Image (tube, helix red, strand yellow):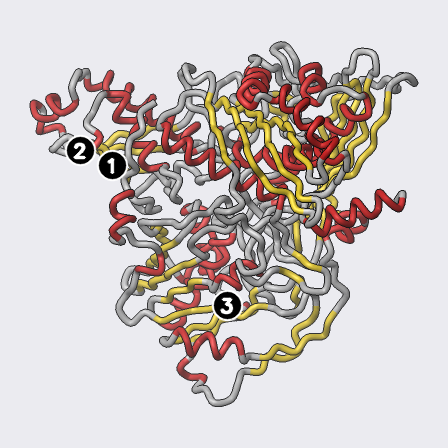
């Protein structure tokens, strides 16, 4: 558990580390997207502004695409560019490029598009409430016993809503395409999570006009959080088409307003829960969950998000009779996609709120109620996968002790009797399966490459990107620590699809869990194969063998058997577990919640780098708290937020004291960390507010307007 300094720390501090907009190429021109300002309609006319020399502009539309006008996705239903009909605000209609970036922006902002407008669904509840909007795709986990609920059991029924959420990465979406006609190579410099996804996207749109697309990331990627998983394929395709048509390098970097309005976000959700609890044992005996996601105009990545959401929908509770149904719904809004947590935060927001609702009805302490129902060794997930450890329970017990929860529960109750402002404390738990779901990692068959040079420098070749989370530092660390090699002689190659094998995308908490553990295993294998004690000494004595290349593929554990059709079996071999307690101070005059403290305890297995892990956890917890407290995307009659002036991110003044602790760190395997900190904090805010005021609110975020409306409705008996 060594805190090795990140390899990019000093270059980022001195400004030498290049992000996408820092790159420039000879004769490079700038590109931008012309997108729909209509939610749904037919394009009747595009009128370019007067006073510009159109011959100076390079323009591409759907008719210029030599390949397929479909972005490759798990569900291939989204075009790169609209042809006649637009299905959402922000749908790309054209790509336009010009040498002068400022003039290009003026040109596009003054271009007018005439539409024949059609009816559109842009309201989240209008989308998710109407069964007619369902795409038809349905996932179910059926773990029902067939028995009717006992008439003595207490029935609880609630519908919970969660909103869009903006990834708010520091660096907007960007892409540079460089057409190389002499060898028919389309080189693309990308700020992305998944270089091989982008490669497939470019080769799909360009077809046989190019021999190959080569994708290389920029040195620095200014954050992603899932937002640079799927959208870069679309952006790279259009940028490449512009470069091909103009014969010049083309750079597109989205303006922040455009990035916020047209790129993928977290899926809004409607989660309806019916549960039946035995009032004597306080055990939840039966549950039905209807999990719905607003996919946006196209499904794209949504089926995969739906799958994880359904698999995490029951939260961390053993319920003997369970039925979970998941569906995608269509709206006329930009397609939603990947975001840290990938469907799980919506699930926990609903179920963890529901647990507190039941506990309040039964007049049971929320902690005690969780203790009774929480997963224990020997229990089963609804997929029939056995629970093999009590680590979730350990997380809960640890966070209760660290936060002094039980004493504060009593203390705050007394305080609230005599004060207008209120204090509250709330619990939530969570877990996250590492890697691709079910058979996904087996199908992916990730490969890594290592080259040992004549000076004993080890070069690691993987497709996994470092988005600021420290992945390349930690991956190198897992290799060099395994064989006690000097850290300065172990480096990670910048991902490049012509140099690095396909080790899979930087998603699904798989970078360290799958690729890091594979590299560690690989290091031991190379050591055994060469038979060295010290690699530097061995290379010095056997110069004729080097440089030497080694390759290794990930092999799925044979115990992972999953029925993809019926959702039965081992969905994830290893899970990370977590629990948190959040304290709030409620300002009654302004209806505002002030976050004061948060304690989060996580089991992520072996912690490779303490500082990097703590930073990841703190950032994720803050994102989760903001999801529950202040972040929302639409205002009635206003539409999407236009920038960070009106999208309410927490400032330094809003951040509470965050306490992170990792437990069970003596286990041999490093499990997933990237996503779990985002999964569980949001409902702890809601539960703390209920503890403070006695008011149930079943929709996040808990903004003052929503709190005021709920209190007024309560007073009116609505």
| Label 2 packing within 10 angstroms: few (<14), some (14-19), many (20+) | many
Q: Quadrant of residue 346?
A: top right
Classify 265 as above or below 637: above
50 horizontally vs 533: left or right: right
Q: Is residue 566 visible?
A: no
Q: Is residue 711 visible?
A: yes
The residue at which mark 3 appears reads as 33
The residue at which mark 2 appears reads as 457
Q: Nearer the viewer, residue 552 or 13?
A: 13
Q: Quadrant of residue 110?
A: bottom right
Image quadrant for the C terminus? top right
Q: Nearer the viewer, residue 663 or 525?
A: 663
Marks 3/2: CA distance?
A: 43 Å
Pointer 3 or 2: first along the chain: 3
Secondary structure, mark 1, is strand
Q: Position of residue 468 (x, y in %)?
A: 38, 43
Pointer 1 or 3: first along the chain: 3
Image quadrant for the N terminus? top left
Hey, which residue is sitting farthest right in the picture?
151
Q: Which mark is residue 480?
A: none
The residue at which mark 1 appears reads as 491
Marks 1/3: CA distance?
A: 37 Å
Please give the name of the residue rendered at 47% of the width and 35% of the height, measured from the top-left corner.
618
């Amino acid at each position: 558990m060594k805190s090795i300094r990140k390899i990019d720390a000093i270059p980022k501090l001195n400004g030498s580390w290049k992000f996408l907009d820092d790159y420039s190429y000879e004769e490079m021109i700038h590109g931008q997207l012309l997108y729909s300002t209509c939610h749904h309609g037919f394009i009747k006319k595009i009128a370019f502004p007067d006073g510009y020399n159109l011959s100076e502009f390079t323009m591409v539309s759907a008719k210029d695409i030599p390949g397929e006008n479909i972005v490759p996705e798990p569900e291939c239903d989204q075009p790169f560019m609209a042809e006649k009909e637009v299905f959402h605000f922000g749908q790309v209609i054209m790509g336009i490029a010009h040498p002068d970036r400022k003039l290009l922006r003026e040109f596009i902002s003054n271009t007018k598009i005439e539409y024949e407008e059609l009816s559109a669904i842009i309201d989240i509840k209008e989308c998710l409430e109407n069964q007619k909007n369902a795409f038809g795709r349905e996932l179910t986990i059926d773990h029902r016993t067939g028995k009717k609920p006992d008439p003595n059991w207490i029935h609880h029924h609630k519908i919970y809503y969660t909103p869009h959420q903006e990834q708010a990465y520091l660096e907007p979406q960007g892409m540079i395409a460089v057409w190389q006609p002499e060898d028919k190579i389309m080189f693309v410099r990308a700020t992305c999570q998944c270089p091989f996804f982008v490669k497939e996207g470019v080769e799909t749109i360009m077809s046989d006009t190019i021999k190959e697309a080569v994708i290389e990331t920029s040195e620095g990627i200014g954050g992603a959080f899932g937002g640079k998983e799927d959208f870069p394929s679309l952006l790279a395709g259009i940028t490449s088409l512009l470069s091909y048509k103009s014969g010049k390098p083309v750079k597109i970097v989205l303006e922040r307003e455009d990035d916020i309005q047209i790129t993928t976000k977290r899926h809004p959700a409607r989660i309806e829960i019916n549960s039946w609890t035995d009032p004597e044992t306080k055990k939840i005996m039966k549950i039905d969950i209807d999990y719905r996601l607003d996919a946006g105009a196209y499904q794209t990545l949504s089926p995969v998000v739906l799958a994880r959401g359904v698999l995490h929908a029951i939260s961390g509770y053993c319920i003997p009779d369970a039925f979970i149904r998941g569906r995608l719904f269509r709206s006329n809004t930009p397609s939603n996609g990947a975001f840290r947590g990938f469907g799980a935060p919506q699930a926990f927001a609903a179920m963890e709120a529901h647990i507190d609702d039941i506990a309040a009805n039964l007049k049971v302490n929320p902690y005690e109620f969780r203790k009774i129902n929480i997963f224990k060794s020997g229990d089963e997930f609804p997929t029939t996968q056995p629970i093999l450890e009590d680590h979730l329970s350990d997380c809960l017990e640890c966070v209760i002790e660290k936060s002094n929860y039980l004493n504060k529960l009593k203390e705050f109750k007394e305080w609230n009797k005599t004060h207008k402002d209120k204090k509250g404390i709330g619990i939530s738990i969570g877990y996250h399966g590492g890697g691709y779901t079910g058979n996904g990692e087996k199908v992916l068959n990730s490969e890594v490459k290592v080259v040992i040079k004549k000076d004993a420098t080890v070069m690691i070749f993987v497709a996994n990107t470092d988005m600021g989370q420290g992945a390349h530092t930690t991956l190198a660390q897992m290799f060099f620590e395994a064989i006690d090699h000097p850290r300065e002689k172990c480096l990670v190659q910048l991902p490049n699809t012509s140099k690095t094998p396909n080790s899979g995308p930087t998603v699904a908490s798989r970078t360290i869990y799958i690729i890091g553990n594979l590299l560690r295993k690989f290091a031991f294998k190379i050591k055994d194969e060469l038979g060295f004690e010290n690699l530097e000494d061995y290379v010095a004595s056997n110069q004729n063998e080097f440089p030497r290349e080694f390759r290794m593929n990930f092999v799925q554990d044979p115990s992972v058997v999953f029925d993809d059709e019926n959702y039965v079996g081992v969905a994830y071999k290893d899970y990370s577990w977590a629990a948190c307690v959040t304290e709030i101070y409620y300002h009654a005059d302004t209806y505002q919640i002030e976050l004061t403290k948060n304690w989060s305890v996580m089991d992520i297995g072996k912690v490779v780098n303490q500082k990097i892990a703590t930073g990841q956890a703190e950032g994720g917890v803050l994102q989760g708290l903001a999801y529950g407290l202040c972040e929302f995307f639409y205002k009635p009659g206003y539409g999407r937020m236009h920038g960070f002036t009106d999208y309410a991110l927490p400032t330094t003044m809003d951040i509470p004291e965050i306490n992170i602790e990792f437990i069970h760190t003596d286990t041999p395997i490093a499990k997933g960390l990237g996503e779990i900190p985002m999964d569980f904090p949001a409902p702890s805010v809601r539960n703390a507010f209920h503890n403070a005021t006695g008011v149930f609110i079943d929709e996040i975020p808990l903004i003052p307007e929503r709190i005021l409306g709920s209190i007024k409705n309560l007073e009116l008996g609505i």
